[in-house]
């Protein structure tokens, strides 16, 4: 099974949400539709700008915590290295 660690942002690219899932397309769709209460709904963080994969659920959770604990600049640098144009990667799913 594949696990995804992902980062969502809003239209202004000024808030970040980091999560983990085993079905990225479904999870992003849930965020975008507003089905999930909380941060992503409140701040309209619906744009997928980064993700990485692993086949180990424990390492996915460790990586999620690592990203969440990192500075804002580290998240920006990571996103820019993976997705320099800050495109919504969910559009290709």
Image (cartoon, grey):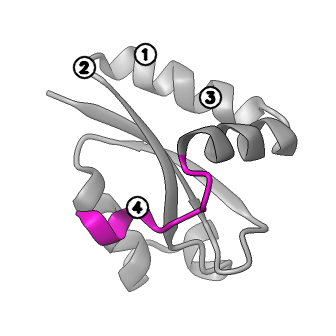
Badge 1 or badge 3: first in the primary sequence: 1
Residue with the mark numbered 3: 65
Residue with the mark numbered 1: 59
Badge 1 or badge 4: first in the primary sequence: 1
Quarter in which the N terminus is drawn: top left
Alpha carbon separation for disc pair 2 and 4: 21 Å
Label 3 secondary element: helix
On the image, the x and y values in percent for residue 12 come to 74, 78
Badge 3 or badge 2: first in the primary sequence: 2
> Which contiguous range is marked in magenta?
83-93
The picture quadrant where one finds residue 54 is top left
**Residue at image coords 40%, 61%:** 89
**Closer to the eye: label 1 or 4:** 4
For residue 19: magenta?
A: no
**Closer to the eye: label 3 or 2:** 2
**Residue at image coords 60%, 61%:** 85
Q: Pointer 4 and pointer 3: residues touching (CB < 8 Å)?
A: no
On the image, the x and y values in percent for residue 62 come to 53, 19
Quarter in which the C terminus is drawn: bottom left
Alpha carbon separation for disc pair 4 and 3: 22 Å
Residue with the mark numbered 4: 89
Badge 2 or badge 4: first in the primary sequence: 2
């Amino acid at each position: 099974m594949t696990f995804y660690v992902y980062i969502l942002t809003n239209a202004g690219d000024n808030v970040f949400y980091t999560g983990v899932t085993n079905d990225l397309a479904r999870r992003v769709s849930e965020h975008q539709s507003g089905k999930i209460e909380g941060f992503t709904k409140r701040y309209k963080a619906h744009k997928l700008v980064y993700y990485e994969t692993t086949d180990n659920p424990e390492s996915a959770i460790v990586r999620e915590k690592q990203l969440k604990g990192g500075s804002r600049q580290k998240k920006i640098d990571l996103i820019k290295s993976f997705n320099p144009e800050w495109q919504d990667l969910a559009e290709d799913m």
